Image (cartoon, helix red, strand yellow):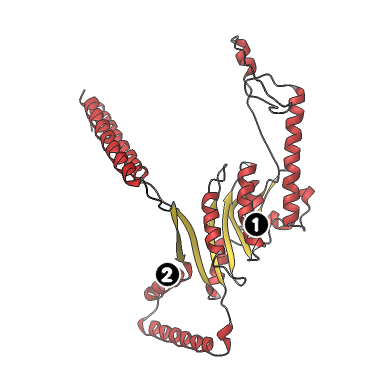
Amino acid sequence: MEIGLFLTKVVIIVGGVLAIVAGVASAGSKGKGESAGHIKVRNLFNDHSDIQKTLEGELLESDELKKKRKAEKKEAKEKKKAKKGENADVVNPRVFVLDFHGDIRASAVSKLREEITAVLGQARQEDEIFVRLESQGGMVHSYGLASSQLQRIRDKGIPLTIAVDKVAASGGYMMACLADKVIAAPFAIIGSVGVMAQIPNINKLLKKHDIDVELHTAGEYKRTLTVMGENTEKGREKFVEDLESTHKLFKDFVLRARPSVDVEQISTGEIWYGTQAIGKQLVDELKTSDAYLCDCYDRKIAVYHVSWSEKKTLPQKFGLSAQHALGGAINTVWERLVSSRFPG
């Protein structure tokens, strides 16, 4: 009884707080046309330099550290003078780093489109956009849109490099192949240039229980295969035909992006690790994204990480807090129950 009363009180209190907060947030948000989010920028070159200086401070002796800092200051002054002199018109390249972690719906494209729009507003021909891509693929139309976002970079003539540390398969490779340069870790999964679809059918189960399903369509191929209806051989043939058509579009897309690829050889739906993919021209170099960026740091190139941060409403923020609170309360009840039954 005590456990039940405690849990009931928690639910009532949390529910009441949520109702009040939702009402206040709803009233306060009316008439406000606030932005849905904002761009965040981090200077990765400065972050890297700070880390190195911290390590040097711990590893080097005091005199050695002073000499190094003095040499760095001298080098910085010389560079500053050079900029004012003959090299005043030289434009230093910059690298803009974006991240894409794709799910089956490529839902991260909502962030990617904002990040690309922001970067293209500032990027010069001398700059580079570096995308760390990870995706096992998913829906055709979703990854088609994600690929179109990357195409915007190519259309602007900005060099695009894509790094695959773990996996870029199917729709993920549809995106990766658009890069001017594709780098991959030795054991990254690449490829899967194919199309698949599977549909469960419970028609026999329904018939067994005397349940009829009616499906009416206008158009011969409006619905080829169904979950509950009785599928026909003609419908199956059309379904496979549609898959083959989509596969051809995929192959043509890869071939246009990477003309050096033997598209018939790599479009069997197979996957390859990075060390194998480089031999099939699916990637250009074996290297991790970290190694690539460290090379940029060594060449004193400015590196900026750009990300789009979604703005959460008050109900969303408090909803998350309420979930944590409710979860904590349930855990407390469970702990009390366990301790009462199994003392000590």
Q: Name the residue under label 2.
A: 51
Residue that extends furthest to the top in the rendered view of this protein: 210
Q: In this view, does 254 lie to the left or right of 189?
A: right
Q: Do the residues labelled 2 and 1 touch (CB within 8 Å)?
A: no
Q: Residues within 10 Å of mark 1 (few under 14, many from 20)?
A: some
Q: Residue at x 55, y 59 (%)?
A: 117
As helix, strand or loop, the secondary structure at mark 1 comes to: helix
Any mark on residue 244, and which?
none
Residue 162 makes an appearance in the image: yes
- Going by the numbered disc 2, the residue's amino acid type is Ile
As helix, strand or loop, the secondary structure at mark 2 comes to: helix
- Going by the numbered disc 1, the residue's amino acid type is Gln
Q: Quadrant of residue 210?
A: top right
Q: Earlier in the sequence, mark 2 or mark 1?
A: 2
Residue 189 makes an appearance in the image: no
Q: In this view, does 165 lie to the left or right of 56?
A: right
Q: Is residue 79 left or right of residue 228?
A: left
**Where does the image place residue 185, in percent across and percent down from the top left?**
61, 57
Looking at the rendering, in which quadrant would you find the N terminus? top left
Q: Quadrant of residue 52?
A: bottom left
**Where does the image place residue 309, in percent across and percent down from the top left?**
44, 54
* In the foreground, 315 or 166: 315
Q: Which residue is drawn at 54% across and 90% down?
A: 85
Q: Residue at x 58, y 54 (%)?
A: 133
Any mark on residue 151, and which?
1
**Where does the image place residue 235, in percent across and percent down from the top left?**
74, 26
Q: Which residue is drawn at 68% across and 26% down?
A: 225
**Where does the image place residue 256, in percent across and percent down from the top left?**
75, 55
